[in-house]
Amino acid sequence: MSWRLKKVAFLPEVVEDVAIRSTAVYLLLQAGQVILGTVYVRFERPPTESNMRLLRASVGQAATALQRIRLAERVQKSQAVEEADKLKTALLHAVSHDLRTPLTIIKTSVSNLSTLADYLTESQRQEMLTAIEQQTDHLNELVGDLLDMSRLQAGQMVIQADWYALADVAGDVAARMWERIKQERLQLDFDDALPLVHYDLGLMRQALFNVVDNVVRYEPADKLVILQGEVHEAEIWLKVINHGPNIPTAEKERIMEPFYHHADGHVGLGLAISKGVVEVHGGRLWVENTPGGGATFILALPLPKEKLPDVDSRG
């Protein structure tokens, strides 16, 4: 079969295929000086100038839209690279500060135990061994935080949820904190009528502990920290209420960013991890002012829409 093509005189983009009685239109998909591709349209009969004007306008709009999408993707990639650079810089700062400090204490204590063994009293030796243990625990927590943060950012945090009361996780965290600070500064306030919530106990325990640990660090030693549960519309709230210093409005979002620099030089990951864990559960974490002074952190989890299991049948 032979093909015979001829140009339509008044429309340079139009080619008529005489053999199959149809007309093809080829238009450049072009935005400014950038050629994005070619548009091919076939008509049963030669298009009119009006048809072509409409087609050119449509193709021009499509080219502009595609170019905007491409530019937006480039901006996103550029921002992602910039954020990655910021995280790398923050990580280097964390390594240089939060890792160096405990390592220095450990090295000094080990060196003293080695070189001054004959001159140290039993209480001095015990004090140095305790310092080594505490700083080793701190290093272990920091490495764990870095791993958790990397999993969250990579979307690799695995949730193994079951039905629990909020008091379950609050009780675990309170017991751990009491053991750590050797003071009963935490007060629990949970109604038995609160509904069960579907969450990963291990992850939520770590998220709540990070918040409580942060609160206790800045709370006056003579003040209680209250853990309180309440239903609020379609969510159940777990509040961590303290009466320490107020958090400036501008800082309320920043303190939950990875590697936020606290006033004491501490580079924090705990609150960022807590926020990520709560969000993975479909919830929210934010901070409000406590009436009378202080800050209240709120971990909000969605109330389940399906029928809740019996409390006695959770096991």
Image (cartoon, rainbow, N blue to C red):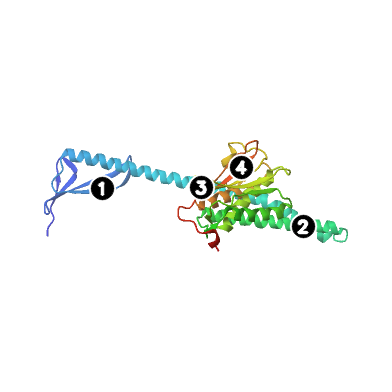
Disc nearest the viewer among 4 and 3: 3
Disc nearest the viewer among 1 and 3: 3
Disc nearest the viewer among 2 and 1: 2
Residue furthest bottom as drawn: 315
* Residue kind at label 2, given as amino acid type: Thr
SS type, badge 2: helix
Residue 39 is labelled as: 1
Residue at x-position 67% and y-position 48%: 187
Query: Is residue 269 visible from the viewing direction of this image?
Result: no
* Residue kind at label 4, given as amino acid type: Thr
Q: Which residue is mark 2?
A: 130
Which is nearer the N-term, disc 1 or disc 4? 1
**How dense is the environment of label 4, judged by Cα within 10 Å: few (below 14), some, or many (20 and up)?**
many
Q: CA distance from mark 2 to mark 4?
A: 33 Å
Which is nearer the N-term, disc 1 or disc 3? 1
Residue 231 appears at what percent x and percent y? 53, 46
Residue at x-position 57% and y-position 56%: 203
Which is nearer the N-term, disc 3 or disc 2? 2
Q: Which residue is mark 4?
A: 296
Pick the residue in front: 291 or 15: 291
- Evaluate if marks 2 and 4 touch, with contact meaning CB atoms under 8 Å apart: no
Q: CA distance from mark 3 to mark 2?
A: 43 Å
Q: CA distance from mark 1 to mark 4?
A: 58 Å
